[in-house]
Each structure stands twice: as structure tokens, then as C-alpha cells.
Image (cartoon, rainbow, N blue to C red):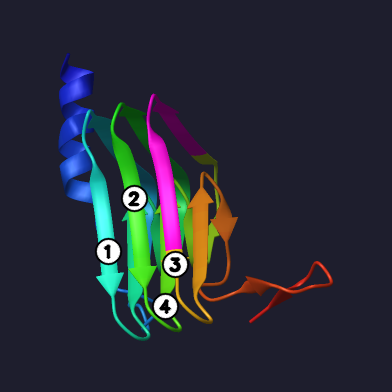
Amino acid sequence: MKAFAFIALSAIATAALATGPAPSPDISITGTSLQAAALTSVAVSNNSMGSKSEAFQNLATNTGNVTISGTSMQGVLGAGGSVRNSATGSDAYASQNLSSNVGEVSITGDSVQLTMIKGASLTNLSSGSNSKAVQNIATNNACFTCQPTRTGGWSH
């Protein structure tokens, strides 16, 4: 029970809605980094509307210029409900990250990324002309605004 309470408190402390790809401050963690979000029958939503709108949603995620000298553990556990992120309008951008590293993240140690969702749906939507949607789940992504090219590569 104490472990579940710890995870629940960690979820409150670490489930943050990030502000976007604006220059991020450098974050340096020496030692162990633990990020956890425990969701039970809870809908987590993030919406942005309008031309050039941006919606960034991060749960148990390192984003920006982050250096971790030690062990990094990131986890999102969920049961029921849904996790949604959307941006609507021309040139809209929606980015949803669960248990992920996005941006310039350096880990000199062990890294564990785990996302377990049961009976829930994960939705990331960007609608409108020239809109983009990126969803990372227990992954590493070194680019905020990268998009796939027709040849299978990535443009920046």
C-alpha cells in the first residue's frame, strides 16, 4: 500500500503538461531519477485550438536539455479511462509523450521506460491544413518537430 501511495504522489508531482518547444532550461540530475504516473479511471486531456496551436502533453517524460548521471526510471500505469491530446487549426501541432525522452536527453547509466495501459485508449490528434501529431510511448525521440519524409527518413 505504501508503494502505491508513493506512486500516486509521484504522479501528482511529475505528471506535467509541458509548455512546448521553446528553449528549455538545462536540467541536470546526479543520481537516480524516478518519474511515475498512476492513472485509475481518470481521463487526462490536453487541447489547444486555433491557427498554429500547439498541445504538448508529457507524463513521466524527460523533455528538453536533460542530463542524468545515474539511473533513470520512467513509468505510466493506467486502468480504464483515456489519455487524449489534440491541437486543432491550420499548422497545428500535437505532441504526446508517455514514459519517454524527448529532445537532447543524455543518460550515463541505466534507463528503464515502461508504459502499461489496460482498458484505456490513448489518442493524439492534430487536425487542419499542415498539422502534425507526434506520439511517443516508452520511446526516445531526439527532435521536437521532426516529421517523416516520403523516403523513410526524417526532416528537421
Q: Where in the figure is residue 10, as x and y percent of width and height?
A: 21, 39
Amino acid of disc 4: Ala
Binning the other alpha carbons within 10 Å of mark 4 as few (below 14), some (14 to 19) or many (20 upward) gives: many
Nearest to the observer: residue 9 or residue 38? 38
Magenta-drawn stretch contains 103: no
Give the residue pinned by disc 2: 84
Give the residue pinned by disc 3: 126
Residue shown at 27%/64% (left/top)? 47
In the displayed structure, 4 sits above or below 78; it is above
Amino acid of disc 1: Asn
Binning the other alpha carbons within 10 Å of mark 1 as few (below 14), some (14 to 19) or many (20 upward) gives: some
Q: Which quadrant of the figure contains the C terminus?
A: bottom right
Give the residue pinned by disc 4: 92
Mark 4 or 3, nearer chain start: 4
The magenta segment is 113-125
Give the residue pinned by disc 1: 47
C-alpha gap between disc 1 and disc 2: 8 Å
